[in-house]
């Protein structure tokens, strides 16, 4: 019997989190804000497609999130 294990954080997400957390730490004292663009499907797909843009993990370090939504993202089957 094969058991599928869901990966919570992949290496790309861990690196993205370290970068964003470091920026937050450096910019917070001077009032800097952090906003990032993400691949549009990350707003709807909790698996993040292994691209390092897991909103649930990066969100606490962000002041704004801009998912890049394009009509072509909605032309095929749901993921």
Image (cartoon, rainbow, N blue to C red):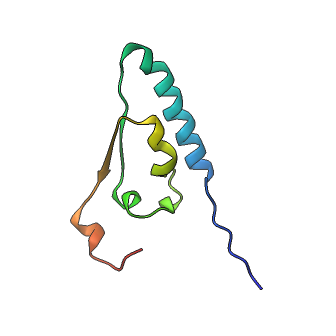
Residue extending furthest toward the left: 71
**Which residue is at 56% across, 48% downward?**
13
Residue closer to the observer: 45 or 76: 45
- Decide if residue 12 is on the left or right side of residue 66: right
**Which residue is at 30% across, 67% downward?**
73
Q: Quadrant of the N terminus?
A: bottom right
Name which quarter of the figure residue 6 lies in.
bottom right
- Decide if residue 34 is on the left or right side of residue 18: left
Is residue 53 visible in this depiction of the protein? no
- In the rendered image, the vertical position of residue 33 relative to residue 59, given as above or below: above
- Measured as percent of width and height from the top left, residue 40 is found at 33, 57
- In the rendered image, the vertical position of residue 47 relative to residue 4, given as above or below: above
Is residue 63 visible in this depiction of the protein? yes
**Which residue is at 58% across, 41% downward?**
15
Q: Quadrant of the C terminus?
A: bottom left
**Which residue is at 48% across, 50% downward?**
56
- Measured as percent of width and height from the top left, residue 29 is found at 44, 14
Residue extending furthest toward the front: 60
- Measured as percent of width and height from the top left, residue 35 is found at 35, 36
- Measured as percent of width and height from the top left, residue 22 is found at 53, 27
């Amino acid at each position: 019997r094969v058991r599928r294990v869901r990966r919570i954080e992949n290496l790309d997400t861990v690196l993205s989190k370290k970068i964003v957390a470091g920026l937050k730490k450096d910019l917070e004292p001077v009032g800097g804000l952090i906003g990032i663009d993400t691949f549009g499907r990350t707003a709807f797909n909790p698996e993040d497609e292994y691209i390092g843009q897991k909103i649930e993990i990066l969100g606490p370090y962000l002041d704004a999130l801009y998912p890049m939504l394009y009509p072509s993202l909605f032309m095929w089957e749901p993921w």
